[in-house]
Image: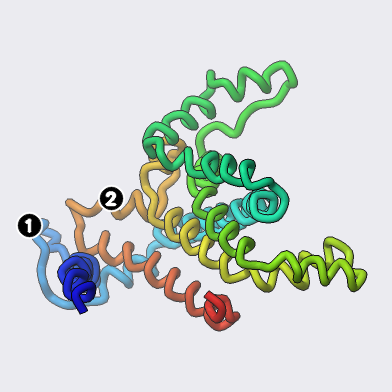
Amino acid sequence: MQVGTLLAGPVGWLVIGYLGSLAVLLIASFWEVDPLSGEVVRNLSLTNFQTLIDEPVYRTIALRTIVIAGLVTVTDVLLALPIAFYMAKVASRRGKALLVVAVLLPLWSSYLVKVYSWRTILSENGPLNWLLDPLGLHGPGFGNVAVWLVMSYLWLPYMILPIYAGLERIPNSLISASEDLGARPGHTFRRVIMPLVFPAIVAGSIFTFSLTMGDYITPRLVSNNQFIGNVVFNNITNDLPLASAFAVVPILVMIGYLLVARRLGAFEHI
């Protein structure tokens, strides 16, 4: 009872701060901007959403953001699975502790430091081109590929840790039983490990997908292309209703993603 009383205040402020601001965002998306005065007119209208649908540029930006978020998520899953499996099932206790620290270590450094480091690496005169020039190759430079690479690096720990936790919960006896019954490693991985670790993969993908959808700093530093976050940031002072309407797009995409994941049974064993 005392614990509930102590948590009531912080939880209440969280609900007010998060859900309250989200409600204001949704309401503001239905407002309009007066074309003459530039002032916000608090009349409910679907004009902003109609603009997002009718204007090809907004559809292109939304599609670009969703595709990059999907590619980042798939990339991080492919990278995180072998790393997490080695950490959970192969490494010794001491090696496991060192690997956990190695995964967490990038999270201790500044987000901007990491992005600016990648900006230096991918620049025209950066280390990557310096290494590739003797081979007659050239780095990707700044663009969508750079955004994909940087975000895959930034959010990889958020994928490794949930998968590692999910693999830790799988008894080694299940894997041994599969091997004793004659299953090959690939078959054991597909039929035993993947179904059990799938909820953890979904949990990690929620982080990587949503963080990529909302990021605007990385695209601004390593690409000239616009993403949803950039449009929202650039219009928040000049056209608040349009920025609010565009900010609703990632929310709707994430709701759809969560509904599909739930229908696939991803949350049944969480």
How much space separates mark 1 and mark 2, taking CA atoms?
A: 21 Å
- Residue 137 in the image: state x and y as whole percent: 70, 25
The disc labelled 2 sits on which kind of residue? Phe
Residue lying farthest to the right in this orientation: 182
Q: Crowdedness of circle 2 by 10 Å Cα count: few (<14), some, many (20+)?
A: some
Identify the mark at residue 37; answer none if there is no mark. Answer: 1
Q: Position of residue 105 (x, y in %)?
A: 48, 38
Q: Residue at x 38, y 63 (%)?
A: 55
Q: Residue at x 49, y 49 (%)?
A: 155
N-terminal of the two: label 1 or label 2? 1
Query: Is 156 above or below relative to 115?
Result: below
* Residue closest to the eye, 3 or 202: 3
In the image, residue 66 above or below residue 53: above
Q: Secondary structure at mark 1?
A: loop
- Mark 2 sits on what residue? 233
* Front-most of residues 17 and 51: 17
For the point 72% across and 50% down, the residue is 90
Q: Position of residue 111 (x, y in %)?
A: 39, 39
Q: Is residue 29 visible?
A: no
Q: Is residue 111 left or right of residue 202?
A: left
Mark 1 or 2: the one toward you = 2
In the image shown, does 258 or 216 lie closer to the viewer? 258
